[in-house]
Image: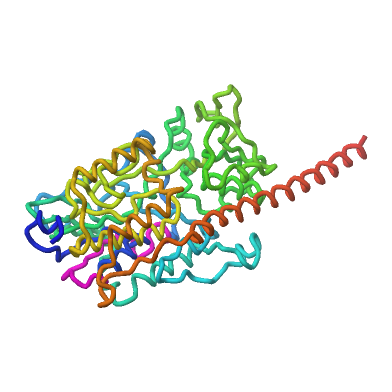
Amino acid sequence: MSRIQQQTKKPIKRVAVIGAGPAGAIAIDALAQERTFDLIRVFERREGPGGCWIGDNNRPQPLNGFASLSNRTADPPVPIPHTLPALTPKLEQPRFTESSVYPYLETNVDAIPMQFSQEPFPSEKSKFSINLHGPNTPFRHWKAVRRYIEGLVSRNGYQDLVSYNTTVERVEKVGDEWKVTLRKEGQQKDYWWVEWFDAVVVASGHYWVPWIPAIEGLEAFEKQRPGSVIHSKHFRGRDLYKGKKVVVVGASVSAADIAYDLAHSRTAQTPVHAITVGHNFNGYFGDEAFKHPRIENHPSIARVCPKTRTVHLVNGESIPNVDHIIFGTGYSWTMPFLPQVPVRNNRVPDLYQHVVWQKDPSLLFVGAVGAGLTFKVFEWQAVYAARILAGRAQVPSVKEMQEWEENRIKVRGDGPKFSLIFPDFEEYFEALRNLAGEGETAKGVGRELPKFRPEWFRAFMEGHDVRKRMWKRVNEQAREEEKAKAKVLEGEVRAKL
């Protein structure tokens, strides 16, 4: 009998899964393959499976509440009706469910490390990606990723386990049961109700609530012309910025992609202004994208003047007549449905192996990690979580779990780097595989985890090199174009003289 069953005095038979993105999709299969649960219920607040890989047809609402975005309080718990079930007016509080994809978005990771171990990733390649990287491009269009996740959820009747357009608003332990309060959006009203479970698996992701730094004058700048300040998750393609003067803030992946896209396509006014100087570039992708000749790099913003639409920089310089400011500054971890598990330093504390909540191992997490081999990490975490709930994997003592976290804090710190698996992928994958055990796969019970294969890590890193080589090649071509253009202009001036 597992320690969970010893605590609850009964086996785990009813499991709730929060989220039907890639983490939730693989968690469904891992739980179902254990063939021991009477009830698996999945709650997804979007209209279908896919998580942050679902596209939106409508543009997001303009940003507001900048103070809460900067201090990471923008997604608080919502009031629960006193009596349930209940019908209430539609919730108006922002929940940040909008998509983060734009029409021509491609993955920035090789397909090999993205695919789960038993489910090959789609081989289809877009013309856009082939033109950029050649016929062997390792990247896939976002729609291919969504279809992949959709296929995982649609198999074996799993789609019948999912309740869509359903938001988990509260998860709380009452006795030895988990009380899950749910809200389904209707056309005019919201319906609220409660369901009860023996365990909960949180697979809700953490790329939802944008983080935007506090900058004097920024909110007034946005209010003067709604839509002039956005986060990268609200970027819907270059065409909205034709002829506009744009400042892009951030030195990591999304800021690099957007600044490069606007500059290279000559859609926005050039140069495109990038706030990167003095900031750390992404460890995987570096700074090559920002070396495009039509990108001008600057230090941090000191303040923004709404009246003159001037962006003042910390070095005393300024960028006048700015039309748009786009922030590629990352996200805030939020779990408003779990107030008893407060996020700390933008990570979830008290998790053993990023999976088991130390205070109650019937609450488990899939996806509470940073970037890198993420889909595969989700699979290993999901199998470990499923085995624990099925009573086939042991959970260490509370002391051992706390020591694991304390030791990791000493090495990684108590912030976002705590959740970053890189570069210790093999160590982490094998630790989870050993903790999960073999299950009873000979009897067709339990999802089997293969040994870690170094080629997954190799493909992951080589995919980054493909993108960096592309940026370097295109940047050099752009420099030659700019030189040729300058010579033509010089010739025209001389001719006039």
Residue found 52% across the figure and 29% down from its top: 301
Residue found 25% across the figure and 46% down from its top: 336
Res 154 seen here: yes
Q: In the visual, does 238 lie left or right of 181?
A: right
Residue 122 x %, y %:
49, 71
- Say if 288 sits above or below 17 in the image: above
Q: In the visual, does 164 lie left or right of 55?
A: left
Question: In the depicted view, which residue is nearer to us: 119 or 1?
Answer: 1
Provide the residue span drawn in magenta: 33-54
Question: In the depicted view, which residue is nearer to us: 206 or 69?
Answer: 206
Res 190 seen here: no
Residue 81 x %, y %:
14, 50
Q: In the visual, does 25 lie left or right of 177?
A: right
Residue found 19% across the figure and 52% down from its top: 361
Quadrant containing the C terminus in the rendered view: top right
Quadrant containing the N terminus in the rendered view: bottom left
Question: In the depicted view, which residue is nearer to us: 98 or 478?
Answer: 478
Residue 344 x %, y %:
30, 38
- Does 46 appear in magenta? yes
What is the image's colouring? rainbow
Residue found at the far top of this picture: 316
- Does 240 appear in magenta? no
